[in-house]
C-alpha cells in the first residue's frame, strides 16, 4: 500500500512539474488551473497518507516513543495541509480555517497550525477589484465613490474589504469577492470529496465526509453576498432589543452577489484585551453580552451566526452613546435550527448545567449520539466526564482539565469522527461556533462564568415554555405554562442576585477590615 502511494505521489509531482513549466512560459498563475490545484491536493494527500502508514512501523503502540512520534507526524502533516491551503487559496483556505476552529475535536497539532490561515488569506489586485465592480455595478470606481482606499482593511478566503466614501459623504465598507473563487469552488469541493473518500479507504477510522457535505451546502450561500445582506438585516431585526449590538446597515443599491456595501464600523477585535483596557471597555460585560446574544440566537430563535472568530466580532465605545458595543460582521454563514432539534438541544444544555445525567443521556440520544453520548457531552461542553457528572455550572474549569480535553481529542479521533457522522448536520456548525466562542472566553479569561450559564438557562426556559404554549390545547394550560415559566425565571433571577451579593461581600469585607484597621 505504501508503494502504491509513493507511485501516486511521484505521478502527481510529475504532472505538477510539467504543467508548471508550461504555465511559466505562458505567464499564467498556477493556482488558476484545475489540473494544478488537483495535482497539489493529490500530492499532499499522498505524502501525508504515506507518512501515517510508514512512520509507526518500528514503534510499539502505546509507548512514550509512539505518542511523541504521533505528535510529530500530526504536526508535519498539519503543516503540509496548511501549505496546500495557502497554495490553492479560496475554498481550501475556508475549509482549513473551519478545521482550525475545532479546538476540542481535532488534535492540537492540527488546530494550532491551521489557525494561521486566518492571517494568510490572499489579496486580489486593484485591477481585479475594479473589474469585478465594472462587471457587477456597470460603473467605474470614481462614479460610485468619492474615495476608495486601495489597501484593503482585511482580506479573507473568499473576499476582501475596502474602506470607501460615497458622494454624499457617508463612509462605507465594500466587501468584494475574489474574482476566481466562484468558478473554482465547485471543482475544489469535488477534489476534496474524492480525496477524503480515498483517505477513508486507506484509514477506515478516518471519517471526515461531514466536512465535504457541509462545504457543499454552505459554500454557495457564502458566495452569495445578497444572501449575506438579508441575513444581516434579519438578525438585526431579531436582536433589536439588544442595545449593545451593532449590525452595519446594508447599501442595497451598491450590492450584488459578489459585492456587499455596508455602513463602516471600526473597533478592536473581541479577543484584544489591551484594546479594551486602553478604551475603558469592561471585559466581563463584553463576554456576558456575547453570551446573551448567542444564547438568544441558538435557543430562542434557532438562527445562528456561525463564524464568530475574533475578526468578525469587534468591540468599541458607541460614538453616540459612549456605551460598550459589539459589532457583528460577516453574515454569510448562518445555521437554521429545526424546532425539534432546538428543543432537544435546549433540554440537553439544561441537563448539562444541572448535572442531570439521565437527561444528558436521553437528549444526547435524541440528537443522534447513541451509545457515544458520554463523548458527545464532553465534546459539546469541552469538559471532562467528571465535570459533566457534577454539573458543569458547579465545577470551575482548570488548566489540567483543559489539557486533558485537548489530549483526548487526539486519542479519541476515530470515535469523534464517528460521532460527527452520526449527529444531525445542524450540530456541526454549532460545534464550530461553540469552539470559537470558547476560544474568545478563554482569551478574555471569562470561561465557564456563572453569568454565561444563567443566560443560557434563561433562554432555554423561555424557548421550552414558548414551545409548550404552541402545543397547549386550552387557555388554562397556556396560563399554567406561563406561570411556571415566570416562576423559573424568578428563581434564576434570585440566584443571580445571590451570586452578585456574594461577590460584592467578597470585595467589600476585606475593604472594610482594611479601613477599620
Image (spheres, rainbow, N blue to C red):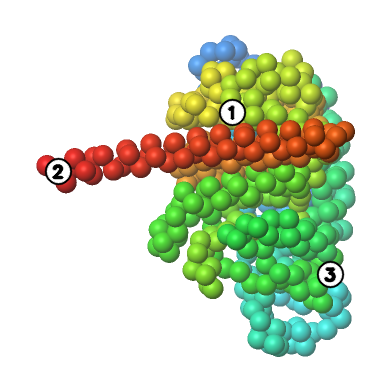
Is tag 3's residue or tag 2's residue first in the polypeptide sequence? Answer: 3
Query: Which residue is more in the foreground, 48 or 155?
Result: 155
| SS at mark 2 in the image | helix
Query: Which residue is more in the foreground, 292 or 74?
Result: 292
Q: Nearer the viewer, mark 3 or mark 1?
A: 1
Query: Which residue is more in the foreground, 18 or 269?
Result: 269
Q: Is residue 96 visible?
A: no
Task: List the single residue furthest toward the left.
Answer: 517
Q: Which mark is residue 9?
A: none
Q: CA distance from mark 2 to mark 1?
A: 41 Å
Where is residue 88? Give x, y as percent. Answer: 74, 52
Q: CA distance from mark 3 to mark 2?
A: 68 Å
Is tag 3's residue or tag 1's residue first in the polypeptide sequence? Answer: 3
Where is residue 307? Give x, y as percent. Answer: 68, 50
- What residue is shown with label 3? 256
Quarter of the rendering containing residue 182: bottom right
Query: Looking at the picture, does residue 81 appear above or below residue 423?
Result: below
Quarter of the rendering containing residue 458: top right
Where is residue 47? Give x, y as percent. Answer: 71, 34
- What residue is shown with label 2? 516
Q: Which mark is residue 353?
A: 1
Where is residue 511? Give x, y as percent. Answer: 23, 44
- Residue displayed at 85% across by 45% down: 217
Query: Looking at the picture, does residue 127 appear above or below residue 421?
Result: below
Query: Which residue is more in the foreground, 508 or 494?
Result: 494
Amino acid at each position: 500500500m505504501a508503494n502504491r502511494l509513493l507511485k501516486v505521489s511521484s505521478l502527481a509531482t510529475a504532472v505538477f512539474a510539467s504543467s508548471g513549466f508550461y504555465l511559466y512560459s505562458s505567464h499564467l498563475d498556477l493556482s488558476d488551473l484545475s489540473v494544478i490545484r488537483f495535482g497539489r491536493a493529490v500530492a499532499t494527500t499522498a505524502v501525508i497518507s504515506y507518512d501515517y502508514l510508514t512512520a509507526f512501523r518500528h514503534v510499539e503502540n502505546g509507548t512514550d516513543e509512539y505518542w511523541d512520534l504521533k505528535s510529530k507526524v500530526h504536526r508535519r502533516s498539519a503543516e503540509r495541509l496548511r501549505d496546500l491551503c495557502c497554495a490553492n487559496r479560496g475554498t481550501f483556505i475556508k475549509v482549513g480555517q473551519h478545521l482550525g476552529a475545532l479546538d476540542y475535536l481535532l488534535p492540537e497539532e492540527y488546530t494550532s497550525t491551521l489557525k494561521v490561515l486566518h492571517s494568510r488569506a490572499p489579496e486580489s489586485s486593484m485591477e481585479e477589484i475594479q473589474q469585478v465592480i465594472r462587471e457587477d455595478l456597470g460603473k467605474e470606481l470614481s462614479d460610485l465613490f468619492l474615495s476608495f482606499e486601495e489597501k484593503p482593511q482585511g482580506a479573507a478566503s473568499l473576499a476582501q474589504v475596502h474602506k470607501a466614501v460615497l458622494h454624499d459623504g457617508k463612509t462605507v465598507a465594500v466587501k468584494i469577492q475574489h474574482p476566481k473563487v466562484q468558478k473554482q469552488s465547485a471543482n475544489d469541493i469535488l477534489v476534496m470529496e474524492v480525496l477524503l473518500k480515498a483517505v477513508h479507504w486507506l484509514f477506515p477510522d478516518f471519517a471526515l465526509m461531514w466536512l465535504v457535505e457541509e462545504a457543499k451546502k454552505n459554500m454557495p450561500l457564502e458566495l452569495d453576498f445578497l444572501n449575506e445582506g438579508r441575513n444581516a438585516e434579519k438578525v438585526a431585526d431579531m436582536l433589536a432589543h439588544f442595545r449593545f449590538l451593532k449590525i452595519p446597515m446594508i447599501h442595497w443599491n451598491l450590492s450584488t452577489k459578489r459585492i456587499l456595501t455596508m455602513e463602516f464600523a471600526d473597533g478592536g477585535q473581541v479577543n484584544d484585551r489591551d484594546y479594551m483596557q486602553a478604551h475603558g471597555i469592561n471585559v466581563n460585560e463584553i463576554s456576558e453580552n456575547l453570551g446573551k446574544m448567542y444564547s438568544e440566537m441558538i435557543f430562542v430563535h434557532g438562527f445562528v451566526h456561525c463564524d464568530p472568530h475574533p475578526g468578525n466580532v469587534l468591540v468599541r465605545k458607541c460614538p453616540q452613546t459612549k456605551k460598550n458595543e459589539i459589532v457583528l460582521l460577516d453574515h454569510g454563514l448562518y445555521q437554521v435550527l429545526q424546532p425539534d432539534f432546538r428543543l432537544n438541544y435546549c433540554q440537553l444544555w439544561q441537563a448539562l448545567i444541572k448535572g442531570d445525567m439521565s437527561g444528558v443521556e436521553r437528549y444526547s440520544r435524541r440528537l443522534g449520539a447513541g451509545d457515544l453520548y458520554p463523548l458527545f457531552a464532553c465534546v459539546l461542553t469541552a469538559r471532562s466526564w467528571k465535570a459533566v457528572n457534577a454539573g458543569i455550572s458547579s465545577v470551575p474549569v482548570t488548566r489540567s482539565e483543559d489539557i486533558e480535553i485537548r489530549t483526548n481529542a487526539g486519542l479519541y479521533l476515530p470515535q469523534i469522527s464517528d460521532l460527527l457522522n452520526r449527529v444531525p448536520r445542524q450540530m456541526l456548525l454549532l460545534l464550530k461556533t461553540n469552539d470559537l466562542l470558547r476560544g474568545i472566553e478563554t482569551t478574555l479569561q471569562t470561561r465557564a462564568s456563572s453569568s454565561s450559564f444563567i443566560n443560557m438557562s434563561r433562554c432555554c426556559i423561555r424557548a421550552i415554555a414558548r414551545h409548550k404554549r404552541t402545543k397547549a390545547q386550552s387557555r388554562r394550560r397556556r396560563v399554567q405554562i406561563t406561570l411556571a415559566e415566570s416562576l423559573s425565571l424568578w428563581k434564576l433571577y434570585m440566584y443571580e442576585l445571590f451570586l452578585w451579593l456574594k461577590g460584592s461581600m467578597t470585595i467589600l469585607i476585606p475593604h472594610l477590615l482594611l479601613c477599620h484597621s
